[in-house]
Amino acid sequence: MREVLQRLQSWAERRLPALTRYRRPESLPIEMHRRRIYIVPTGFGIGFSVLLMVMLAGALNYANNAALLLTCLLGAASSTSMLVAFRSLNGLRLSHIHAGHAIAGQPIELTLSFDSTRARNAIRLDLGRTSVAFALDANVAARVKLALPTARRGWQPVPRLRLWSSWPLGMFRAWSWLNPDQSVLVWPQPEVAGPPPHALADDSRNMRLHQGDELATLRDYRVGDPRRHIAWKASAHHHSLLVKDFEQPQSRPQWQLDWRQLPGLGDEARIARLARWLNEAQAQRRHYSLWLPGTDIPAGGGPLHYAHCMSALAQLP
């Protein structure tokens, strides 16, 4: 039955221009109103209507006032449910869409923020074959999360979304399309394996003192050294005070990730290799710089620096 309704809906969209009026991208916020909300009976609603017709024919044939009254009450209830289903969408507003980060081929998480001046129940949002149900209170935003499939790197537009509800009795479905004018950035997929990147030489500029836990050496006392670091037993056999030194030099070579260092690869292969180097640098907590055509990102580290570099790779032509 659901497939039949979907085919009927597709046919109606092709035949009726009003149904395709809001298929063009729209800027946020998008608010539901009576000109963009459509109502169709569900399979249960069609079966219930047939039952009411049979009950009405029987009540009129046998002149049964009680059966006629029951039929009218049930018909009024079904008509009221159609109005309630319409009101469940009317006035609902999509205010914001936030996207997470994902590598090409992996789904990216979309967070859609809905708000309304009154409470609503049993609202559903469809993205392809994925459907999410949610409810929201009056003047409180509801955040709905959806997984958007991705195929390649770069900017990907948010596809058309269907918002619908069959609340409260499931006899009628009120629905509308959301086509936000917004895109999400998909990061490139790194290569599986390859050579390591180029690192700067381990000179004095890339060395720093590391405060360790194990004793490194004993040195002469300097003004300002903590008294707890004085080696009293060793100082007794020495002409001056000796201090325990826990500081050790630690090498932190900086990686130079440069587009120009990969002349024998195509553009996409270069992007995949640089993406792998970025992942390795982030996993090893190294500092790294990135040079791309038209973009020179200085050395840095951390999640924000990693996201900046991956986004720059994703936006390459």
Image: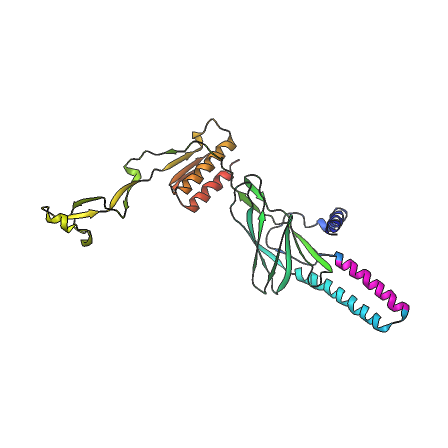
In the rendered structure, the answer to whether residue 82 lies left or right of residue 116 reads right
- The residue range painted magenta reads 44-61
Would residue 311 be counted in the magenta stretch? no
Q: What predominant SS class does the magenta segment belong to?
A: helix
**Residue 290 placement: quadrant:** top left
Q: Which residue is drawn at 17% across and 48% down?
A: 243
- Residue 62 in the image: above or below residue 181: below
Residue 235 at least partly seen: yes
Instruction: Provide residue 265's location: percent of width, then percent of height.
Output: 49, 28
Q: Does the magenta stretch include residue 45?
A: yes
Q: Which of 257 and 145 is in front in this view?
A: 145
Residue 56 left/right relative to 148: right
Residue 272 at x, y percent in the picture: 49, 35
Q: Which x, y percent locates residue 206?
A: 31, 38
Q: In this view, does 100 lie to the left or right of 227?
A: right
**Going 11% across and 49% down the picture, which residue do you hit?**
236
Residue 125 x, y percent position in the rendering: 63, 54
Farthest residue toward the top? Answer: 264
In this view, the residue in front, 159 or 190, is: 190
Q: Nearer the viewer, residue 253 or 315?
A: 253
Relative to 128, 226 lies left or right? left
